[in-house]
Image (cartoon, grey):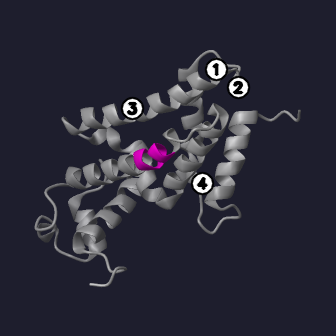
């Protein structure tokens, strides 16, 4: 198998991810998935355990990608504003690498069942807490003039996490340009000082 040829399981995950993003997890049936793949619905089960099995793989793979990208940022010995700018860029890179998977990760995780749902919540909390820590560092150093790091991080992530809805790889801005624009906007605002 060549490096560009996907395994059947990878094909299933890719098609399911696209369907979950466009139709939603709950509205996508195994029959829909089989039809898109051109196979019998029953034969899907020789490759996967369940529809939720696919959702778990997509959500936790994306969570791992976000955490890996952010781990590189956390270890940098730079001022908080620069660290936050790097965190925004890392977040944007992960979102733009696979927009359908990003959409599933951001919107369909609610369909995970226990214990996966709790594990997902814990991973998300840790990611957000790491961002809050950067903001707290910036407040302590006097770089940031805010008092509520939780609100700042929620606003930041709310702004960034819509990216999967409008980003187009063939668009006029590259992921790096988007990251630069958004980090400048989010860190510096609209004012011209």
- Return the residue at label 4: 166
Number of numbered discs on residues: 4
- Return the residue at label 1: 139
CB atoms at circles 4 and 2 under 8 Å apart? no
| Dot placed on the residue nearer the N-terminal end, 3 or 1 | 3
The residue lying at 28 percent from left, 68 percent from top is 10
| Numbered mark located on residue 126 in the image | 3
- The quadrant of the picture occupied by the N terminus is bottom left
Mark 1 vs mark 4: in front: 1
The residue lying at 32 percent from left, 31 percent from top is 122
Closest to the observer: 60 or 73? 73
Write down the region rendered in magenta.
67-72
Circle 2 sits in a helix, a strand or a loop, which is it?
Answer: loop
C-alpha separation, residue under disc 3 versus residue under disc 4:
27 Å
| Dot placed on the residue nearer the N-terminal end, 2 or 3 | 3
Horizontal side of 180 relative to 160 (left or right) equals: right
C-alpha separation, residue under disc 2 versus residue under disc 1:
6 Å
Indicate whether residue 70 is drawn in magenta.
Answer: yes
């Amino acid at each position: 198998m060549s490096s560009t040829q996907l395994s059947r399981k990878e094909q299933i995950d890719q098609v399911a991810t696209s369907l979950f993003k466009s139709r939603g997890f709950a509205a996508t049936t195994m029959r829909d998935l089989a039809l898109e793949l051109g196979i019998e619905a029953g034969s899907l089960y020789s490759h996967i355990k369940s529809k939720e099995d696919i959702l778990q793989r997509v959500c936790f793979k994306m969570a791992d990608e976000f955490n890996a990208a952010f781990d590189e940022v956390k270890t940098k010995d730079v001022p908080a504003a620069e660290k936050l700018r790097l965190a925004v860029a890392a977040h944007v890179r992960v979102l733009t690498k696979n927009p359908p998977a990003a959409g599933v990760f951001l919107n369909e995780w609610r369909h995970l069942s226990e214990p996966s749902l709790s594990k997902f919540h814990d991973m998300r909390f840790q990611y957000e807490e790491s961002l809050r820590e950067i903001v707290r560092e910036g407040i302590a150093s006097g770089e940031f003039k805010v008092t509520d790091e939780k609100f700042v991080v929620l606003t930041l992530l709310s702004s960034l996490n819509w990216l999967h809805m409008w980003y187009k790889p063939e668009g006029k801005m590259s992921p790096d340009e988007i990251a630069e624009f958004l980090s400048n906007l989010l860190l510096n605002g609209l004012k011209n000082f």
